[in-house]
Image (cartoon, rainbow, N blue to C red):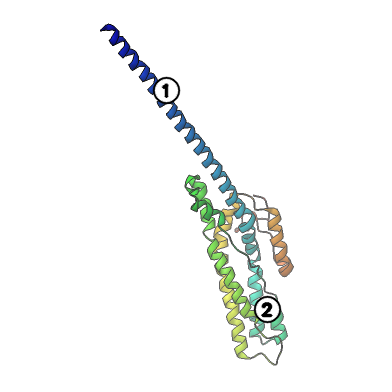
Amino acid sequence: MAKRLAKARFDWLESARELAIVVAGVLVALLAQEVVQDWQWDHKVAVATAAMRDELLSDDGPQIYQRAAMHPCVLQTLDRVREAVERGRSRAEIGKAIDGYWVEFRTFDRLALDSANSSDIAAHMPQDQLRDMTRVYQIMPLMERTNAQEGADLARLRAFRRTGSAVSDAEKDRVLEAVEALRSDEQIIWLRVQAKLPLLMNMGPLDQKRVQHFMANARQHYGTCVKDLPADWPNGAPARPLGQG
């Protein structure tokens, strides 16, 4: 009888040890899986964050910077067109004033943010960092729609005939309607740029080569009217070198 009890106890201890080994193995496997998943998410978050920063600081940001720098030049040009019309200038003079107006037509993207949201990566990002980026990204759809509207309004302005007799009142009205439509477009963009560009520039330095590229494009059309933004823009402190944070 004692032998049976000893054997039963031995079997129970062996079974308990085997069970403990199995449980420990499962726990180790689960822990290893969790570590691997955490590493994978960390990697995905790092890649997504880098993509969003690149999109904002190398693509959208330099374009927005250009629009901020061009703002006074755009308004001055629209004022010159209106003045030429209202003072009864010749067809050639009005046409020349119209030709002075220029904006660059670009897309304002949020592809990196949309990708992070659709793949659930955004939920794993530091939420304060995601919030700061999202606050800037919020303006991109409106910027793009308004930029596209500018294209249509500019087409109306440039439809002004460059040949013919005296400019009729109907032609003048059409030019002035296009001027004010473009002024409205500019105001929409300007308000968003004022609000978001400082936030964007606080995220890090804009891509210097891209900023210089867009500024060079603007200066081809507006010359020295286009100036680098001051360091504490929009408050008006001395200008800083391009691309510095």
Q: Amino acid at mark 2?
A: Ile
Residue extending farthest to the bottom is 165
Q: Residues within 10 Å of mark 2 (few under 14, many from 20)?
A: many
Note whether residue 157 is visible. Answer: yes
Q: Residue at x 49, y 53 (%)?
A: 118
- SS for callout 2: helix
Query: What numbered label is drawn on residue 98?
Result: 2
Query: What numbered label is drawn on residue 237?
Result: none
**Percent x, y of residue 188:** 55, 68
- SS for callout 1: helix
Q: Which residue is mark 1?
A: 21
Say if 40 sits above or below 94 in the image: above
Q: Mark 2 or mark 1, which has the lower sequence index?
A: 1
177 or 14: which is nearer to us? 14
Q: Quadrant of the N terminus?
A: top left
**Percent x, y of residue 19:** 38, 23
